[in-house]
Image: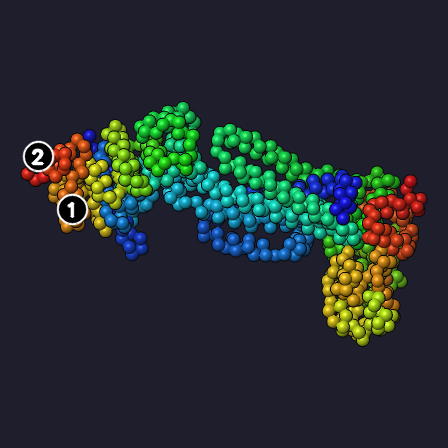
């Protein structure tokens, strides 16, 4: 199971004199849910876009499923990777059904039945009522739009899903619901997810591993527990200070936290295990 | 006035219907080409942004060329007639097209394009599935503007001998028939408004998303496309059996309209030839003569003095003693003079009666000492001619205070409204009978002789010798008084040139 699906080897990205990514190396195991966090301009979105070849690295190699993406047709590569960007950006001139069917249609134009089945399946998984198929994005609520965005990214059943601050534009309650949904989807599909966010709370809640970046370099790349317990440096410590003093573990682990209301009375040395 | 317009529309509905169809054919062809090319260019410069700036610059520059000049530039390349009109209209229609396509495509939200790209769309798929559908509202409003503009602009196409409602407008102006001008203008405006209205419906419908609306749109779209294609095909493959067709041109002058009708009536009655009559070609000799040399016209009524100075570029004053020389020079060009009508349409100067009375002006020489206080009016080609304005001023040593360019048909109105004091007239002007003006004596015989006859391409005459008899029938038949009277009937009494032509031929016993 612990098979590497994505690997960055000494990747650098520079625009003229401005180096955005400096000698970046890390790998992602199949089935991981990686959240990438850092302040604006730290290179997190650039890192994500290099995986589906929207941005080309200046130096270094990126491997997806064992193949160097330099040797891949970028169009084919992108079709095999799900992609959801900020606000999900649906195509305003297409119905919900057409939006979700976009990538399946690029892949197999002729097999209409299969595409239809995929649309039905993914609408169900993301929790959209089938009656919404004929609606246009402008007729949907913010939360519904995000769900369509996720369904669209997943419709061709990719192995990898890239998400760039997908829940940036929705209210707190909807966002929390969507976070639970994406966790559920991750558990159901065992898909590998890379999720860019600037919200540390979200990063810790969703991830199996968190990648913390600053100025184009990795500050720490570890499980949420390890990051909270052993911040690698002062930057990470500052970033997670608040989270070290509150508990945001998922429901099934909440009682293990001595500071959480759910675990009142239980005290374990070291706080979070 | 409105009654007169309605009367005209009802009694001559077939004339207007023909013009209307021709108008639609010319504008739709230009619109069709502009949509195809404009879309292509717009898409190309949007995909390759570097070329956008200079392409739009060039098109912008072309757009600033006045339409009349554009037509003038094009005549040496594509001749007179529908082709030039379509080319000029297409050029004008391109800018709004290219611009709206470019604006529409470059204003699509970049986030949407990145989403499409990130999901694995090729460049072509992004263009066809995302950019174009999203740019469609902008492109549609561009098309709507362009169509309205083109239909209106087609009105000037008749200036270079093309068809359309402009024929009615121009004929109305030339023959002092304001009902005709108004009818042509109203129909053009109505056509443009109707097109705008229909495209407005199309625009609205395209924003409807339901499946039913989309199916209806598809059916409507195919129907419209078929209608347009059949109109265009009709224009391209218009039956033109050149062998049996005599192409006659006339200048934008009332008497030439009448002569044109006479020729058509007579030739179609007596021979098995068809006549294609292009009435009132703008610019007169300067545009008809080159078209004759390119075989686009076979024959047109011309005046000897005009031919001598404008066509043969002689600088001396023409007298009828030189006719043999004129004929010889024309035969060298592959044309010849035939069927001299018998009347002379030379230039004359008139002065408003109150001015003539006040200063006692009777001759051109009398005019000299008052000229600097007077405004002189003439049609624009008088200022260009060898025997025109400059030569007149030189001969009599006079200079006018102001000069005005006026269309032949509007001169008398300008004189009546005191916008001008002195003007050039033709000795056959029908309005002369009515005008409050005094004709002055050309005491130094400045103006040359202008006998009216026909110029025909020799090749045509050899191919259809039966035409000779027709010209013979007309030779010497029309006296100056006849022509003035006929012009008067048309210009002042507002009769139809064709009716007057028929009536005259009847009195001469040439037709039944």
Which residue is tagged 1?
Answer: A241
Q: Is residue A184 visible?
A: yes
Which quadrant: the C terminus of chain B? top right
Which residue is tagged 2?
Answer: A266
Label 2 in the same subunit as label 1 = yes
Q: In the image, residue A234 lies at what x, y percent?
A: 14, 50
Q: In the image, residue B288 lies at what x, y percent?
A: 75, 53
Going from N to C along the chain, the mark reached first, 2 or 1, is 1
Q: Is residue B341 left or right of residue B284?
A: right
Q: Which chain's residue wears label 2?
A: A
Using the image, determine if residue A44 lies above or below residue B217.
below
Which residue appears at 74% of the width and 60% of the height?
B406
Q: Which chain's residue wears label 1?
A: A
SS under mark 2 = loop
Q: Identify the image quadrant of residue B444.
A: bottom right
Q: Is residue A251 left or right of residue B55?
A: left
Q: Tell me if label 2 and label 1 are in contact, CB under 8 Å.
A: no
């Amino acid at each position: 199971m612990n098979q590497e699906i994505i690997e960055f080897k000494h990747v650098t990205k520079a625009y003229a004199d401005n180096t955005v990514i400096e000698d970046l190396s890390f790998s992602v195991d199949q089935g991981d849910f990686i959240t990438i966090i850092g302040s604006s301009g730290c290179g997190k979105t650039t890192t994500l876009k290099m995986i589906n070849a929207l941005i080309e690295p200046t130096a270094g190699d990126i491997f997806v499923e064992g193949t160097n993406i330099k040797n891949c047709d970028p169009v084919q590569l992108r079709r095999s990777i799900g992609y959801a960007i900020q606000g999900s950006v649906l195509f305003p001139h297409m119905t919900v059904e057409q939006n979700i069917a976009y990538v399946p249609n690029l892949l197999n134009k002729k097999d209409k039945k299969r595409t239809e089945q995929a649309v039905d399946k993914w609408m169900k998984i993301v929790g959209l009522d089938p009656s919404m198929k004929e609606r246009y994005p402008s007729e949907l609520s913010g939360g519904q739009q995000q769900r369509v965005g996720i369904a669209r990214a997943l419709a061709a059943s990719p192995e990898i899903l890239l998400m760039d601050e997908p829940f940036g534009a929705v209210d707190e309650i909807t966002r929390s619901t969507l976070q639970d949904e994406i966790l559920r989807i991750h558990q159901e599909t065992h898909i590998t997810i890379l999720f860019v966010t600037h919200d540390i709370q979200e990063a810790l809640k969703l991830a199996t591993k968190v990648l913390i970046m600053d100025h184009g370099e990795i500050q720490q790349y570890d499980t949420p527990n390890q990051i909270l317990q052993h911040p690698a440096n002062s930057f990470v410590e500052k970033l997670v200070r608040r989270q070290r003093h509150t508990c945001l573990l998922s429901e099934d682990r909440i009682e293990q936290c001595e500071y959480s209301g759910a675990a009142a009375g239980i005290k374990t040395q070291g706080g979070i295990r | 006035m409105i009654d007169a317009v309605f009367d005209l529309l009802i009694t001559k509905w077939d004339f207007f219907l023909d013009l209307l169809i021709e108008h639609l054919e010319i504008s739709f062809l230009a619109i069709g080409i502009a949509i195809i090319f404009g879309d292509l260019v717009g898409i190309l410069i949007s995909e390759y942004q570097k070329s956008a700036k200079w392409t739009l610059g060039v098109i912008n520059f072309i757009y600033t060329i006045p339409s009349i000049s554009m037509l003038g530039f094009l005549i040496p390349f594509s001749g007179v007639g529908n082709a030039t009109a379509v080319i000029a209209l297409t050029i004008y229609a391109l800018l709004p097209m290219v611009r709206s396509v470019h604006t529409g495509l470059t204003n699509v939200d970049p986030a949407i394009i990145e989403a499409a790209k990130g999901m694995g769309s090729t460049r072509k798929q992004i263009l066809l599935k995302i950019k174009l559908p999203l740019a469609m509202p902008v492109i549609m409003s561009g098309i709507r503007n362009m169509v309205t503009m083109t239909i209106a602009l087609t009105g000037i196409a008749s200036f270079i001998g093309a068809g359309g409602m402009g024929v009615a407008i121009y004929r109305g102006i030339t023959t002092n028939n304001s009902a005709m001008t108004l009818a042509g203008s109203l129909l053009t405006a109505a056509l443009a408004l109707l097109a705008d209205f229909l495209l407005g419906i199309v625009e609205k419908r395209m924003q409807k998303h339901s499946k039913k609306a989309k199916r209806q749109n598809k059916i409507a779209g195919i129907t419209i496309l078929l209608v347009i294609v059949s109109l265009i095909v009709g224009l391209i493959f218009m039956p033109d059996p050149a062998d049996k067709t005599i192409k006659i041109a006339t200048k934008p002058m009332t008497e030439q309209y009448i002569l044109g009708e006479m020729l058509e009536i007579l030739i179609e009655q007596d021979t098995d030839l068809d006549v294609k009559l292009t009435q009132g070609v703008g610019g007169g000799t300067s545009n008809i003569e080159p078209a004759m040399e390119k075989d686009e016209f076979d024959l047109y009524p011309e005046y000897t003095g005009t031919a001598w100075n404008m066509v043969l570029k002689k600088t001396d004053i023409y007298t009828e003693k030189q006719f043999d020389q004129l004929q010889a020079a024309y035969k060298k060009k592959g044309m010849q003079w035939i069927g001299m009508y018998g009347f002379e349409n030379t230039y004359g100067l008139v002065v408003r009666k109150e001015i003539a009375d006040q200063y006692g002006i009777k001759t051109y020489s009398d005019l000299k000492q008052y000229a600097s206080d007077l405004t002189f009016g003439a049609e624009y080609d008088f200022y260009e001619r060898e025997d025109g304005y400059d030569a007149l001023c030189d001969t009599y040593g006079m200079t006018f205070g102001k000069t005005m360019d006026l269309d032949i048909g509007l001169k008398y109105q300008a004189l009546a409204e005191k916008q001008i004091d002195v003007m050039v007239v033709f000795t056959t002007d029908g309005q002369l009978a009515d005008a409050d003006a005094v004709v002055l004596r050309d005491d130094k015989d400045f103006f040359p002789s202008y006998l009216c006859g026909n110029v025909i391409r020799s090749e045509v005459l050899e191919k259809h010798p039966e035409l000779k008899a027709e010209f013979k029938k007309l030779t010497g038949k029309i006296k100056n008084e006849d022509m003035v009277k006929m012009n008067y009937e048309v210009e002042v009494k507002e009769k139809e040139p064709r009716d007057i032509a028929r009536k005259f031929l009847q009195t001469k016993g040439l037709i039944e």
